[in-house]
């Protein structure tokens, strides 16, 4: 009986291949010691979908650093990327105060407290304050 060698090719998601190529391109021309935040952010997004180990192995980034980012241990650093410097709050559209009080804190320690804001405005202010919308 003749035995033949079978090669097993693992399936790597296209997003991981794309990120690996970006990381390799950065390494080839790196001007800074630290990998850019946008590459780490993309790696974190992938790790939350596929797991830390597969992403760190296939993209060739530090498992420990990626795990810290995914677990939120470095959340403050990522939150500091572009916090809004000014949040404008317009009066309630309905013209009547709803009696709602809203207090929000960000990981960087910045706090916002607003009284008599309607629910729609509260949602908009929260998104801007937390950096989810500009």
Image (tube, rainbow, N blue to C red):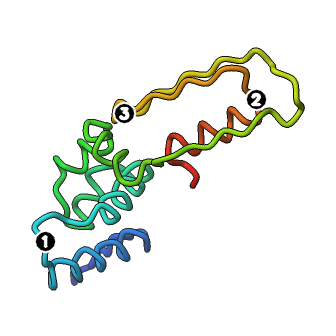
Residue to which mark 2 is pinned: 119
Q: Residues within 10 Å of mark 2 (few under 14, many from 20)?
A: few
* Left or right placement of residue 58 versus residue 48 in this view: left
Q: Is residue 61 left or right of residue 69?
A: left
Q: Nearer the viewer, residue 78 or 61?
A: 78
Work out which residue is located at the far top of the displayed protein and give it: 99
Determine whether the residue tagged by mark 2 lies in a helix, strand or loop. Answer: helix
Answer whether labels 3 and 2 touch (C-beta < 8 Å).
Answer: no
Percent of width and height locating residue 113: 55, 23
Disc 1: CA contacts within 10 A as few (<14), some (14-19) or many (>=20): few
- Residue at image position (68%, 36%) is 123
Query: Along the polypeptide, which appears first: circle 1 or circle 2?
Result: 1
Residue plotted at (24% across, 50% down): 66
Q: Residue at x 29, y 61 (%)?
A: 37
Quadrant location of the N terminus? bottom left
Between the C-alphas of marks 1 and 2, the distance is: 44 Å
Of the pair 6 and 94, the residue shown nearer to us: 94
Question: Label 1: which residue?
Answer: 32
Q: Quadrant of the C terminus?
A: bottom right
* Image vertical order of residue 106 relative to residue 18, above or below: above
Note whether residue 58 is visible. Answer: yes
Q: Mark 3 = which residue?
A: 107
């Amino acid at each position: 009986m003749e035995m033949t060698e079978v090669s097993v090719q693992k399936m790597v998601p296209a997003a991981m291949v794309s990120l690996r190529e970006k990381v390799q391109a950065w390494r080839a021309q790196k001007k800074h010691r630290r990998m850019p935040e946008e590459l780490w952010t993309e790696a974190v997004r992938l790790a939350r979908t596929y797991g830390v180990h597969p992403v760190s192995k296939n993209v060739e980034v530090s498992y420990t650093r990626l795990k810290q980012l995914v677990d939120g241990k470095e959340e403050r650093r990522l939150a500091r990327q572009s916090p809004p410097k000014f949040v404008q709050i317009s009066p309630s559209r309905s013209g009547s105060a709803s009696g709602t009080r809203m207090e929000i804190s960000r990981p960087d320690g910045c706090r916002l407290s607003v009284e008599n804001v309607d629910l729609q405005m509260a949602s908009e202010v929260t998104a801007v304050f937390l950096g989810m919308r500009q």
